[in-house]
Amino acid sequence: MDGDAPVFTIELDGWEGPLDLLLALARTQKVDLRRISILALVEQYLRWIDRAAALRLELAADWLVMAAWLAYLKSALLLPREPDMDPDPEEMALRLQLRLERLDAMREAGARLMARDRIGRDVFLRGDPEGLNIVRKARWDAGLYDLIEAYGRVSARTRPVLHVVATRPVMTLDVAIERVEAMLGTRIDWTSIAAFLPADADERYRRSALASTFLATLELARQGRVAIRQDAPFGPIDVRRIA
Amino acid sequence: MTDPFVRAVEAVLFASETPMTVPMIAAYVGDGDVRAALATIEADHAGRGFGLVRRGEHWHFETAPDLAHFLRRDRDESRRLSRAAIETLAIIAYHEPATRADIESIRGVQISKGTIDVLLAAGWVRPAGRREVPGRPLQYTTTQAFLDHFGLNTRRDLPGIEDLRAAGLLDPIDDAFASVLESGDDSD
Amino acid sequence: MTDPFVRAVEAVLFASETPMTVPMIAAYVGDGDVRAALATIEADHAGRGFGLVRRGEHWHFETAPDLAHFLRRDRDESRRLSRAAIETLAIIAYHEPATRADIESIRGVQISKGTIDVLLAAGWVRPAGRREVPGRPLQYTTTQAFLDHFGLNTRRDLPGIEDLRAAGLLDPIDDAFASVLESGDDSD
């Protein structure tokens, strides 16, 4: 076994991890990976780790984890087999062997791939091709609507802006004050503001009248001529003449 | 099977990034009659899609000159006209003949040179003489191709300002939107 | 004199800077039997210094492999690829789609970020969606440029892929493990 010693002189960073080293060690057994002696492999690895430790090489954690795992595997393989041992050491050894086979297969495949006739190394493309041209002809996509709309947009942007406000039925504040004054003259009790609105008018006129009438009562209250009350927010508003 | 030396010369010329002289070729392929190989290759490719060509002392492969039209391909690309281009086209159509200054005064912004070029390239407008004012600016009008493309018989088929107003196309966007909302209320 | 259509196909392929598919060629040469023309051109160049080759759906001219010694310029190129990169490429090609974890589990070491970057930069691998497992890891596959570069027509041409598959060496360890356990007793 001491004949393997030269292997260990290879520097640490020459190995891409413990599995890489294990595969290299397995190759030294010079047998098909399927017939490899896992026990011999484990011993080689552990010896390698020992030497690295003796040389005071810093070992990365995964190397030590692998060493611990292999040490466990070794003892499990050597001890008398307990039927209910879990995990089964034979299975662990088989898994290791399968992993080595797979790494070996891919290493081999990579080498065969690299050995193929490769463009730029073994075969060459034309050095100075004329090249193919695509002449792009723009086909403009615009319809009549786009055209008309564009003109409308330009015109709208540059023509003087004209605002036409349609006439709407409105009750002015003056009219509202007059109405409220006149109607209050005949009432003494609290009266809802709604009672002051024209009853049979157009809805939009009624809404205008409501706003104007409310303002009118505020104005009359400010002049000290009416009192206003509202029991709750958004509740009905009542008005009473101050006698 | 071609002669090995001829094959080597052929491969070196094919892979070269520049035309090569006989000594340049010899530096790759070694001893042999390069000139004889070139003559063989030239004869072998006569009448094919590409061939060996000599320019002065340099040799190279090139595609046959009579096939040049196959090496280019036209592709129609449907593209939207830019907002500036469609507005410029509309102004020319409504106001023709229109000068660049007319267009800019109506659009309210300057137009870039490319904008009218696009319309000229599309064949929709054409120059139509100069206006006899200081500076003699070029005027533009629309073309028959313009009428054809937009499905118009004459320019008079373009809707007038009153039509546009009726269609709501003169309303600023917000007003148009509001009028849709209002009409929605009425239908309730 | 060669058939005009064959000449046109030949010229287009010869002038092209990239490998072309039949539809790409047809876009330049118009109607005709492009496949038949390709077969003719392939036969005409057999045994010459360069010839027509098919890689997947793409066709291109390249020099004959046995003439590499006349043409090789940079012998160091293959050395630039690290062993990690070569193995990673092989794992992606033979197992595709493969995740980073797949690669690491086979190689037994973590892969540095640069390793996949090198392959992506060469255009030989590309991301190909995520695997629907926890963490949704990104998967990688090889590209048409990979096939071109290594002279492969399809992934089935990968060296030894059928043997590896038959031997179960492309199956995950757990699957292989189960099948070995089943048949394991027989082989002893």
Image: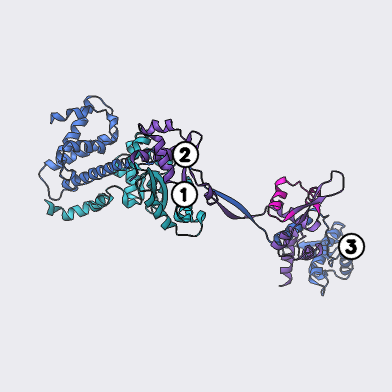
Chain colours: A blue, B purple, C cyan
Whole-percent x, y for residue A37 in the image: 14, 41
Q: Which mark is residue C71?
A: none
Q: Amino acid at mark 3?
A: Asp
Residue A184 showing in the rendered view: yes
Which residue is denoted by mark 2 in the rendering? B60
Give the left or right position of residue B100, taking residue C84 as reference. Answer: right
User: Dot 3 lies on which element?
Assistant: helix
Neighbours of disc 3 within 10 Å: few (<14), some (14-19), many (20+): few
Q: Amino acid at mark 2?
A: His
Which residue is denoted by mark 3 in the rendering? A174
Neighbours of disc 1 within 10 Å: few (<14), some (14-19), many (20+): some
The chain ID associated with circle 3 is: A
User: For the residues marked 1 and 3, what is the alpha-carbon distance in whole angstroms?
Assistant: 104 Å
Which residue is denoted by mark 1 in the rendering? B47
The chain ID associated with circle 2 is: B
Whole-percent x, y for residue B57 in the image: 49, 33
Residue C122 showing in the rendered view: no
Give the extent of the magenta segment: B97-125
Residue A34 vertical position relative to residue B122 in the rendered view, above or below: above
The N terminus of chain A, quarter of image: top left
Whole-percent x, y for residue C39 in the image: 39, 55
Give the left or right position of residue C48, taking residue A241 as reference. Answer: left
The chain ID associated with circle 1 is: B
Q: Are marks 1 and 3 in contact (CB under 8 Å)?
A: no
User: For the residues marked 2 and 3, what is the alpha-carbon distance in whole angstroms?
Assistant: 101 Å
Closer to the observer: label 1 or label 3? 1
Residue A203 vertical position relative to residue B128 in the rendered view, above or below: below
Whole-percent x, y for residue A179 in the image: 88, 67
User: Dot 2 lies on which element?
Assistant: strand
Q: Nearer the viewer, residue A220 or A70?
A: A70
Q: Are marks 1 and 2 on the same chain?
A: yes
The residue lying furthest to the top in this view is A55
